[in-house]
Image (cartoon, rainbow, N blue to C red):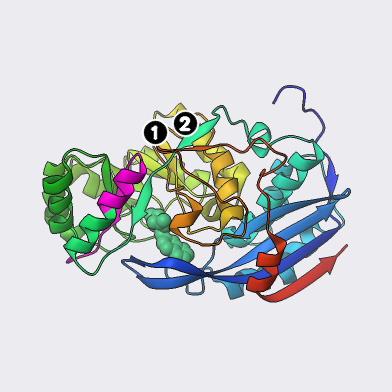
């Protein structure tokens, strides 16, 4: 942004905390049901300031290959030595400095995002200013997990529409798809609605997925294999619902390939999956240049990761509501006070304080911490 020329910082200390928080309600996807969220909080100290990042890996390698244990190991033994004692000119250089380690984007993102927060604080600026955000508030949608019954689903949809959320996403899997969408259309009419399969189908299900075409869905997210592009392109030729890719988009190159093959019409950006803010901005910009709208995904983050997401989602090509809902849908209490709140019109204000701009309740963090580790330059 204008006026911010020098973002130099030196990384002096890296701290990991393994934290566990109970979820307000269970969350079920095509890959399983969870009752709590276990994640790594990462602090980077340098030049008298501290930046925070949150690793979005889970306990199981079911959404993606990474877990808390792999992230802890890779950060401590391989990534921390690449940043400790180093001086960076700009946080956008951090991801490239970790390139020797293949993959492990969620582990890399925790460090990279903490570096952005640190640099923003050293500049006395909100993170959104460094990222190139152009919005003062972002549009918020909800992701509703698989329920025990269609009645339970209807209750949830009613509740979220009443709360003001700007679109409803439901998780689907074989046996919980067409009837669930049909019920929502019958009871709630033409509300902005989409579905997310988390890779639960194969190309052999194309005719079945085409049954969703008549409901005017905004999109179907990641219907096929987590690392697939080609079959999604074949599927997109057989259905009219726009395909959105999530799991398959692990880099700007993967996004370029998917767009070139017409494997998707929309892309979900999650900084954890992409290795941080810088690679997310590259995907955002590439999609903007190719007329592909993006929206910000969610990984059941605490208020710390959620705040990072709000700042990133303030960039201009985040044209659809994100999976960035209120803290109270997930954690009561959250690790930040006050939590992320959603207005009656379904928006979240972009914090204007320094860095991620939220206040961490360190007593709550300590109470929820299972294990810690500290590495110094
Ligand atoms: C998605 N999130 O868009 C993911 C999937 C997901 C809000 O729908 C722990 C770790 C639990 C990762 C639950 C939403 C998770 C997780 C869901 C990811 O596909
Ligand atoms: Mg998804």
Classify mark 2: helix, strand or loop.
loop
Q: Is residue 278 visible?
A: yes
Residue at x 51% of width, y 33% of height: 137
The circle on residue 238 is none
Q: At which x and y percent is residue 303?
A: 58, 54
Residue at x 80% of width, y 70% of height: 374
Instruction: Depth check: give the residue in front, 366 or 210.
Output: 366
Q: Is residue 163 magenta?
A: yes
Residue that carries the numbered disc 1 in the rendered image: 292
Instruction: Depth check: give the residue in front, 71 or 343.
Output: 343
Magenta region: 157-175
Residue at x 88% of width, y 49% of height: 48
Question: What is the quadrant of residue 280 in the picture?
Answer: top right
The circle on residue 317 is 2
Name the image quarter holding the N terminus.
top right
- 2 vs 1, front mark: 2
In the rendered image, the residue lying farthest to the top is 2
Q: At which x and y percent is residue 76?
A: 73, 70
Instruction: Depth check: give the residue in front, 326 or 19.
Output: 326
Q: Alpha-carbon neighbours of circle 2 within 10 Å: few (<14), some, or many (≥20)?
A: many
Q: Is residue 75 visible?
A: no
Residue at x 73% of width, y 43% of height: 91
Q: Above or below — where is 24 with respect to 232?
A: below
């Amino acid at each position: 942004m204008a006026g911010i020329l020098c973002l130099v910082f030196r990384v002096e200390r890296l701290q990991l905390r393994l934290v566990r928080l109970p979820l307000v309600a269970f969350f079920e996807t095509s890959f399983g049901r969870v009752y709590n969220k276990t994640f790594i909080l990462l602090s980077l100290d340098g030049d008298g300031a501290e930046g925070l990042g949150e690793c979005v890996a889970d306990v199981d390698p079911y959404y993606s290959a990474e877990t808390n244990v792999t992230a802890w190991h890779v950060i401590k033994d391989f990534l921390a030595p690449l940043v400790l004692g180093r001086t960076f000119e700009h946080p956008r250089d951090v991801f490239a400095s970790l390139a020797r380690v293949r993959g492990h984007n969620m582990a890399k993102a925790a460090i990279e995002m903490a570096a952005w927060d640190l640099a923003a604080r050293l500049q006395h600026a909100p993170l959104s200013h460094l990222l190139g955000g152009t919005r003062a508030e972002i549009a918020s949608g909800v992701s509703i997990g698989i329920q025990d019954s269609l009645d339970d689903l209807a209750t949830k949809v009613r509740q979220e529409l009443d709360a003001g959320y700007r679109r409803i996403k439901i998780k689907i899997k074989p046996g919980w798809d067409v009837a669930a969408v049909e019920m929502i259309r019958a009871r709630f009419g033409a509300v902005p609605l989409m579905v997310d399969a988390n890779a639960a189908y194969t190309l052999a299900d194309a005719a079945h997925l085409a049954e969703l075409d008549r409901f005017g869905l905004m999109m179907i997210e990641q219907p096929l294999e987590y690392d697939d592009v080609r079959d999604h392109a074949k599927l997109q030729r057989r259905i009219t619902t726009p395909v959105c890719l999530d799991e398959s988009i692990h880099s700007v190159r993967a996004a370029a390939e998917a767009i070139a093959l017409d494997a998707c019409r929309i892309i979900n950006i999650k900084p954890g999956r992409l290795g941080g803010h810088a690679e997310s901005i590259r995907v955002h910009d590439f999609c903007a240049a190719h007329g592909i709208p993006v929206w910000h995904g969610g990984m059941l983050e605490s208020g710390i990761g959620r705040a990072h997401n709000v700042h990133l989602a303030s960039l201009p090509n985040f044209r659809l509501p994100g999976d960035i809902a209120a803290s109270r849908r997930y954690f009561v209490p959250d690790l930040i006070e006050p939590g992320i709140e959603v207005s009656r019109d379904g928006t979240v204000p972009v914090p204007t304080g320094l860095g991620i701009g939220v206040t961490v309740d360190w007593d709550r963090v300590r109470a929820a911490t299972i294990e810690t580790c500290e590495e110094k330059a």
